[in-house]
Image (cartoon, grey):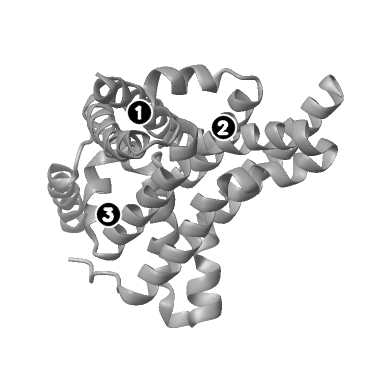
Amino acid sequence: MDYLRAFLVGGIICVIAQILMDKTKLTPARILVLYVTVGAILGGIGIYKKIIDFGGAGATVPLLGFGNSLAQGAIKAVKKDGITGAFTGGLTATAGGIAAAIFFGYLFSIIFNPRTKK
Amino acid sequence: MEKDIKKQQEYKDIAQKYEPKPTLLKNVLWAFVVGGLICDVGQFFLNLFVKRGMTPEQAGTPVAIIMVFLGSFLTGIGIYDDIGRFAGAGSVVPITGFANSIVSPAMEFKREGFVFGVASRMFNIAGPVIVYGVGTSIIVGLIYYFLKG
């Protein structure tokens, strides 16, 4: 059941991006920036948590979830450390993902070469 | 001259015949299926960590790390771009697509060196994502501080 909900929510999030890409000429890079920003806003006002409660990984795996983690981390850290937390919380909450992206990204870029285009 | 125009028209007709015509419906369907499946892979690992005693919130980080690993690896061996060709946003929006946006330009520009080729091109797209994401989160934190403080 949770697989079905993750599939639905994740699929719908991707469909919205696909429609934006086809109808507005937004490039994938802009979509990613848009999604992380919207995710942080939805996370900040507490809406995204409800989507995660329903969709599980369907909501956390798309970049919206990354934005949500940033905003939730900032709020959590403000509760704990006051105003400093606004600056430490976001990156603290997402440190694992960002560090992995830098590490594996670098590693596989070094190991592999782009395939020659056919 | 007249012959040239005729040839040009012929060329246009042939080119048009072979030009792929991606319909919105087809794109949307593929984005839905592939995006959904990638999220289900994430759900599989999420369930795995929850079963081993983590809360879903705690499990978020290791799941993100695994998905980033898979995204970078599949990009490295060239499979992710094959998926992306028909999946469109379905392969862009998940965090595996974020990893793809790092490895793809970094590999491409390796010949420009390991500093300005690989290391700086890694952030072609990831850089803006982090700038806007972290920037927004700081604003959210500040607003929360002043509203609740």
Q: How many marks?
A: 3
Q: Is residue B113 visible?
A: yes
According to the picture, the residue beneath numbered tag 2 turns out to be A68
Is the residue A69 above or below the residue B123 in the image?
above
Q: Residues within 10 Å of mark 2 (few under 14, many from 20)?
A: many
Q: Residues within 10 Å of mark 3 (few under 14, many from 20)?
A: some
Q: Which of marks 3 and 1 is in front?
A: 1
Give the amino acid at mark 1: Gly
Give the amino acid at mark 2: Asn
- The residue that appears at 27% across and 39% down in the rendered structure is B41
Give residue A21's position: percent from left, percent from top.
Answer: 41, 34
- The residue that appears at 42% across and 47% down in the rendered structure is B62
Is the residue A113 above or below the residue B52 in the image?
below
Q: Is residue B1 visible?
A: no
Q: Do labels 2 and 3 share a chain?
A: no
Q: Nearer the viewer, mark 2 or mark 3?
A: 2
**Marks 2 and 3, how far apart in space?**
27 Å
Q: Do labels 2 and 1 share a chain?
A: yes
**Marks 2 and 1, how far apart in space?**
15 Å
According to the picture, the residue beneath numbered tag 1 turns out to be A10
Give residue B83's position: percent from left, percent from top.
Answer: 23, 47
**Secondary structure type for disc 3:** helix
Q: Which mark is residue B81?
A: 3
**Secondary structure type for disc 2:** helix
**Secondary structure type for disc 1:** helix
**Marks 3 and 1, how far apart in space?**
20 Å
**Mark 2 near mark 1, Cβ–Cβ under 8 Å?**
no
Q: Nearer the viewer, residue A24 or A46?
A: A46
Report the quarter where the N terminus of chain A lies: top left
Give residue B5's position: percent from left, percent from top.
Answer: 21, 52
Horizontal side of residue B108 vs A87, given as left or right: left
